[in-house]
Image (spheres, grey):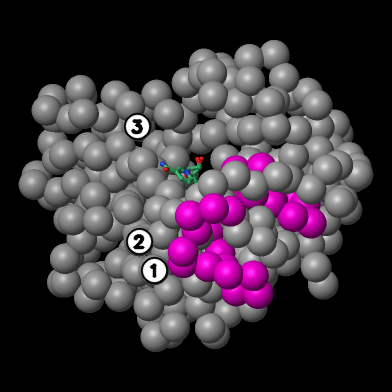
Amino acid sequence: MKAIASDRYGSAENLALRDVDVPRIGAGEVLVEVHAAGVDPGVWIMMTGRPLAVRLASGIRRPRNPVLGRAVAGVVSAVGDGVTRFRPGDEVYGTAESGTFAQFTRARERRLARMPANLTFDQAAAVPISAVTALKAVKDARVRAGQRVLVIGAGGGVGSYAVQLVKQRGALPTGVCGPSKVSLVRSLGAVEVIDYSQREIDSSGVHHHAIIDTAGNRPLSLLRRVITPDGVIALVGGGHAKGAVLGGFGRQMAAPLISPFGRARLAGVTAREHHADLDELTRLLEAGEITPVVGRTYELAEAADAMRYLEEGHATGKIIVSVRR
Ligand SMILES: NC(=O)c1ccc[n+]([C@@H]2O[C@H](COP(=O)([O-])OP(=O)(O)OC[C@H]3O[C@@H](n4cnc5c(N)ncnc54)[C@H](OP(=O)(O)O)[C@@H]3O)[C@@H](O)[C@H]2O)c1
């Protein structure tokens, strides 16, 4: 099968379209024919091997799995022993184990869900990592109806869902984004939009009940200036290019330790990959309460360009690699 692969950590220049073996599935696993794959900062981390801490899981000197990509939408091709929820022909989405920038991928049954009936494969591949993370952030931030919630990075992969999920809970999202995304963020339901090229988040004197920070590039002292004393600051992203060893994870891991020393509660958000969250999102997607924002779509052979665009750090909504057009 065709796949985008690299045998070493580094830049997008290393990525090449290659012929590799179709993955073999074991018990509890599903072989999925990939129609579309999601692109997110986690893929960049696997491509570069940075921050270095991730190599403990992905391979110290070189990636154990040369094929990139985790989020997938596609069609079940075969199922392993013990798989009960799917059979060949089912349309599914979720996260995979063997790389999704490929014609086939291997996924654990528990990390897959039935695909929402109203989405295309490209739209569905935009959900598994980013929307699941946004859902966890909204829960960790304890967002309730009527509250003011600041979403930083509101026009990106996670932020575009976070704005919609805050609104869906009856709360009032304020989105923070660059100038090119102001109208998009407003269309997603933000009651106010802060264009960070014009003013900072503390310029209006408003205090928010919760902050969901996906950009991760403002000091905690600034975030604490704009939160109510009993509010929650949900730390999602930490600027994936920063810090050689822990990168953005450092701040999230430290959150429980530093939380008691200062205004508001800090919550380091860690999304889990389980079909229960996807099932919850499927209901919201099919009810039209949230919609994926697919900003750019690339063909499989153009995956390196998709990674370069992601690396610029200003993606609009989700970036998708459309494998089967
Ligand atoms: N904790 C977890 O489990 C988890 C899971 C998934 C992702 N993440 C992390 O979450 C972060 C965001 O992921 P993503 O998929 O949403 O990335 P993304 O699609 O690249 O979006 C990032 C967004 O931040 C905006 N941005 C950049 N600088 C900004 C600034 N100074 N202020 C406000 N917004 C700014 C960018 O566009 P504009 O500048 O044009 O507005 C872009 O839309 C990453 O660090 C990722 O590693 C964490």
Disc 1 to disc 2: CB gap under 8 Å: yes
Q: Disc 3 residue type?
A: Gln
Numbered tag placed on residue 279 in the rendering: 1
> What residue is shown at x 70% (from left), y 32% (from top)?
65
Magenta residue span: 80-107
Q: Is residue 137 above or below residue 87?
A: above
* Residue in front for this viewpoint, 260 or 87: 87
Question: Is residue 268 visible to the viewer in this orientation of the structure?
Answer: yes
Q: Specify which label sits upstream in the sequence, 3 or 1.
A: 3
Q: Residues within 10 Å of mark 3 (few under 14, many from 20)?
A: many
Q: Is residue 56 above or below residue 232?
A: above
Numbered tag placed on residue 276 in the rendering: 2
Q: Tell me where residue 299 sits by quadrant.
A: bottom right
The x and y percentages for residue 154 are 45, 59
Magenta residue check for 174: no
Secondary structure beneath dot 3 equals helix
Numbered tag placed on residue 252 in the rendering: 3
Q: Disc 2 residue type?
A: Ala
Magenta residue check for 98: yes
